[in-house]
Image (cartoon, helix red, strand yellow):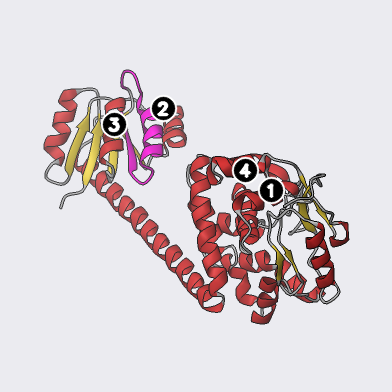
Amino acid sequence: MKTRILIVDDDSNILDGYKRHLRMHFDVDSAPSGEAALERLDRRNPYAVVVSDMSMPGMGGIQFLARAREIAPETVRIMLTGYASQNTAIEAVNEGNIFRFLTKPCPPDVLVKTLNAGVEQFRLITAERELLEKTLSGSIKVLMEILSILDPDLFGRVLRLKELVQTLARTLNVSSSWDIESAALLSRVGHVGIPPEVSAKSRKGEAMSHDEKEMLARVPEMGRHLLSNIPRLETVSRIVLYQDKRFDGSGFPSDSVAGDKIPLGARILKPLADLLEIESDGTSRSMAFKQLLSRKGWYDPDVVQKISQCLLDEKDQEIVKGRDFISIPFEELRPGHVLVSNVETSEGMLLLAAGRKLSPAHLERLRNYAKLAAIKEPIQVEEAVSDLGE
């Protein structure tokens, strides 16, 4: 099968001549202007090579090849011109990133030789891309399989995180969400270096030593280290490194990066991962979202607003717009408080579910449990009200 090339020239006689000389070697398509050629590139890509005259009415050759690079970056670009100056050549190379620069009249054998070189370059480019895509997808697949074996629960959570990222990326009009989706899948891959018993403690909310807490805090760094060995995952590894960084600059890693300097992917992963973490104990999405709002300085406000728009239905949004809530120690619970978070023992035993308005009887029951086991703190509640009923 012949390789497809595109010839662009405003002179129909020249186009006909090109077709006669080249059709034995290539599948030749032609366009009488830069505008028409862009339509063909957009509709019928891929062409292996595009050859353009430089001087054309309307859109010139340099402008056309620059646009062609945006539409079909893998297509090899060649410029033909009747007059070539050094400035013209420099502009063509810089703007259109051309492969070769030829002057008219160009002998047919020279043109064929140049086109063959362009076709070979196109094959090298596409072969490298295919190899890279297979290498990346294969590497990610292996890491995901390892994580699924070591911690199935965590694996399920990163799959749900990826789904939320896809939904949010569409709302944020992120042009290419591949890096962020990949970072979501790989966000917890650093757990492969964490002892299983430490991961289990974290999941159950059990007390941990300083060293164990430090291990978990450095999961993003471990993940970044693993990904640094895979070519072309630099952007993904940076998102993974900063996934726990708070918008105000606090959190891991301890550096000066804050606000918009934090990668957008990390600013998306942070609230979504925390939302899933809160929901994992049965807390409703609206209540979980209210907990996010209580964490001042943790998240990018624009991202949180988009999460509200695309992940909360109208009823949930009305709940979120209700009274503000605060985080308080167990001893400060009072009748009339509405629980935004569950009340649990430090061992993870559920005592009262989120959404419950506290009565004196509830508080008496909780105080009795507190004599037997530590209560997980702080507890998120809406502001106290005077009504003590259920």
* Residue 65 on the magenta span: yes
Number of the label disc, if any, that sits on residue 290: 1
**Residue 175 percent across, percent down from the top left:** 48, 42
- Sequence-wise first label, 4 or 3: 3
Real-space Cα separation, disc 1 to disc 4, in angstroms:
15 Å
- Sequence-wise first label, 3 or 1: 3
- Sequence-wise first label, 2 or 1: 2
How crowded is the residue under tag 4: few (<14 C-alpha within 10 Å), some, or many (20+)? many
Three-letter code, disc 3: Glu
Residue labelled with disc 4: 303
Instruction: Using the image, determine if residue 344 lies above or below residue 327.
Output: below
Name the residue rendered at 56%, 57% in the picture. Answer: 236
- Sequence-wise first label, 3 or 2: 3
Residue labelled with disc 3: 39
State the SS at label 3: helix
Q: Nearer the viewer, mark 3 or mark 2?
A: 3
Describe residue 98's horizontal placement relative to residue 376 as left or right: left
Three-letter code, disc 4: Val
Residue range (magenta): 56-81
Number of the label disc, if any, that sits on residue 85: 2
Q: Nearer the viewer, mark 2 or mark 1?
A: 1
Real-space Cα separation, disc 3 to disc 2, in angstroms:
30 Å
